[in-house]
Image: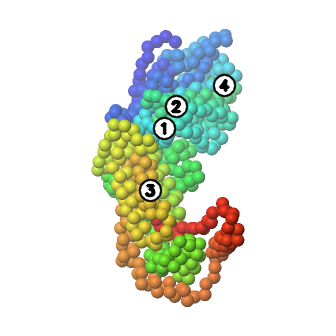
């Protein structure tokens, strides 16, 4: 337990690991291809808190943690496969320990083979109690946002699970655990047992101050076979949370890449099968990731073009009916009940579905959430600049505010502003082509929605807000071209006139709507009759008006 600490660096094309003879384990890991916010190389597991250890028997009723011992050895050799191997030994009267680490070329995974001689003497009941500690320090510009995207992850009984790193908590494992990990937004540190830990627990703390994202401690048990000799195959991963890289290890570590969660967990398949392959294809064509995102946007818009056209066609039909709807408004004045019934009758006669613009929009919602998850977890964008954005994986800032605006932040994101302005333009364009529904709230919706987005988008990655900007510009162009040069309004009007001549059958939805409106009309008539017959009583009931949205294009 007395000695001098020595650091032995071992590296491949991706990582540089500093091994220490104290505890015979990694002291720090540098990721060569990634930079921290201060422009230094990203380091993982590099604090005094980071370590793994387990207890061994050192005498009668005495134990000590192996992290307190100075191991011998530390020589680096190469095996027949070109892997670098570093081996540490610890001798004692009770037995011996061997820590062997294997670093493969172009790999972030470090194989760790633990050899025990005299296991029946060194270990109580041939059981190892591992303690693995990891402190994740800030690696993104926005610590708060990085915490939101970080979690503690694990694979228990063959199933992946995770818990948020936003608050301190703990998990207990009663079944076999394959690995535990601290996953930051774009990087993770993972401790792996190739033959599983038998049980254990993990606790984590989220400090309120400083630059620490989360601090975790895992206590993991492993039962060794009876006998004096034992070999325990373990492993450690220190690297990017990249879907393709993690998938090669075949133990669900790729599930740490948040490509869809919660009620929209199914969108991860859109990302895995469509978005990631297409993004990687465009990435091979150009090194400019802003152009890659532009090409991806064009592809996505082409993919959903049938839905887009259906939505615009519905909008064109509503535009053709606008004069007749205005006539109905003039006819009924403030009688919303009669106006709604005649409007539905007009839609049915013309063969127009008032929800025709809404359904295609609803079908696009999964794509929206898929891309939101993709841009928040895509490590390939980290550190890549485009126009004024220095890092597409983080918000772009053109001005720093001297104060913090609640829900907005202390910076001004230009890509957020371009996304909001183009979104506002779409709303105004759509409002102008839609009939006036007489609802004063709807008049302000084109302004309210972009203001809400301003607060939501300001801290999002620049790559995501650049995607929204491009997508909105495409939407504006498509709306203008389709409605002015592709959709023939005269043909639509002729088709609608033709539909009016056909016998009409009501759908169940239309029947229910008309029944509800008829019931409400009867209630109103009854209320008016009561008022006229009993003028000395003032009914507190207020006559309601059943209204419905005529479209979702806005």
Q: Who is closer to the viewer here, 548 or 307? A: 548
Tag 1 or tag 2, which sits nearer the N-term?
1
The correct choice, above or below, for 216 with respect to 324 in the image is above
The residue depicted at 46 percent of the width and 54 percent of the height is: 371
In this image, 415 relative to 305: left or right?
A: left
**How far apart are labels 3 and 1 at the CA level?**
29 Å
Q: Which mark is residue 448?
A: 3
Disc 4, SS? strand
The reply to whether dot 2 and dot 1 touch (C-beta < 8 Å) is: yes
Q: Gap in Å between the C-alphas at discs 2 and 1?
A: 9 Å
Disc 4, disc 1: CB below 8 Å? no
Residue underneath mark 4: 127
Tag 2 secondary structure: loop
In this view of the protein, can residue 104 be seen by the observer?
Answer: no
SS category of the residue bearing label 1:
helix
Q: CA distance from mark 4 to mark 3?
A: 62 Å
Q: Nearer the observer, disc 3 or disc 1?
A: 3
**Upstream in the sequence, badge 2 or badge 3?**
2
Dot 3 crowding, Cα within 10 Å, few <14, some 14–19, many 20+: few
Q: What residue is drawn where x is 55% and y is 49%?
A: 261
Looking at the picture, how far across and down is residue 287, in whole percent?
32, 51
Instruction: Name the mark on residue 467.
Output: none
Residue 553, x across and y down, in percent = 47, 67
Residue beneath label 1, please?
Answer: 147
Q: State the residue position of label 2.
A: 206
Determine whether, in the image, residue 193 is placed left or right of residue 28.
Answer: right
Q: Is residue 505 visible?
A: yes
Neighbor class of circle 4 (other Cα within 10 Å; few <14, some 14-19, many 20+) is some
């Amino acid at each position: 337990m007395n000695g001098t600490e020595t650091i032995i660096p071992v590296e491949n094309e991706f990582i540089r690991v500093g091994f220490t003879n104290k505890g015979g384990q990694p002291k720090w890991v540098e990721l060569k291809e990634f930079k921290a916010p201060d422009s230094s190389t990203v380091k993982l597991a590099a604090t005094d808190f980071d370590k793994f250890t387990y207890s061994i028997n050192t005498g009668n009723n005495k134990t000590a943690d192996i992290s307190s011992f100075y191991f011998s050895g530390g020589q680096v050799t190469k095996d027949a496969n070109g892997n670098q191997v570093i081996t540490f030994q610890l001798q004692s009267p009770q037995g011996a320990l061997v820590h062997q680490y294997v670093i493969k070329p172009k790999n972030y995974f470090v194989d760790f083979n633990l050899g025990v001689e005299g296991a029946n003497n060194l270990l109580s009941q041939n059981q190892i109690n591992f303690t693995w500690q990891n402190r994740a320090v800030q690696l993104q510009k926005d610590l708060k946002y990085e915490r939101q995207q970080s979690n503690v992850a694990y694979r228990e009984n063959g199933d992946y699970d995770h818990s948020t790193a936003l608050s301190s908590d703990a998990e207990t494992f009663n079944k076999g655990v394959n690995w535990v990990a601290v996953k930051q937004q774009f990087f993770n540190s993972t401790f792996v047992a190739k033959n599983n830990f038998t049980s254990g627990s993990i606790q984590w703390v989220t400090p309120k101050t400083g630059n620490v994202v989360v601090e975790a401690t895992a206590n993991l048990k492993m039962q060794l076979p009876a006998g004096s000799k034992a070999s325990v195959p373990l492993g450690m991963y220190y690297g990017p949370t990249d879907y393709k890289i993690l998938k090669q290890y075949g133990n669900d570590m790729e599930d740490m890449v948040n490509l869809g969660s919660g009620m929209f967990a199914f969108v991860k398949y859109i990302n895995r099968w469509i978005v990631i392959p297409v993004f990687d294809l465009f990435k091979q064509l150009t090194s400019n990731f802003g152009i890659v995102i532009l090409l991806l946007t064009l592809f996505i818009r082409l993919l959903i073009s049938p839905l887009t056209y259906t939505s615009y066609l519905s909008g064109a039909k509503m535009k053709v009916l606008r004069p007749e709807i205005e006539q109905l408004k003039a006819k009924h004045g403030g009688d919303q009940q009669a106006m709604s019934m005649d409007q539905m009758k007009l839609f049915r006669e013309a063969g127009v579905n008032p929800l025709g613009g809404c359904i295609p929009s609803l079908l696009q919602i999964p794509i929206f959430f898929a891309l939101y998850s993709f841009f928040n977890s895509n490590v390939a964008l980290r550190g890549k600049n485009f126009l004024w954005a220095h890092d597409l994986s983080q918000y772009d800032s053109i001005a720093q505010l001297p104060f913090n605006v609640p829900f907005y932040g202390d910076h001004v994101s230009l890509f957020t502003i371009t996304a909001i302005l183009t979104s506002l333009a779409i709303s105004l364009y759509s409002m102008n082509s839609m009939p006036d529904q007489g609802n004063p709230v709807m008049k302000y919706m084109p302004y309210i929605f972009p203001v809400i987005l301003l607060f939501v988008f300001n801290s999002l990655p620049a790559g995501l807000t650049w995607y929204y900007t491009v997508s909105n510009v495409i939407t504006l162009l498509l709306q203008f071209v389709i409605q002015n040069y592709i959709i023939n309004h005269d043909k639509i009007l002729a088709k609608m006139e033709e539909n009016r001549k056909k016998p009409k059958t009501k759908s169940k939805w239309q029947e229910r709507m008309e029944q509800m409106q008829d019931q409400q009309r009867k209630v109103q008539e009854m209320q008016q009759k009561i008022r006229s017959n009993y003028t000395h009583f003032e009914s507190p009931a207020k006559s309601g008006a059943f209204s419905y949205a005529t479209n979702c294009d806005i």
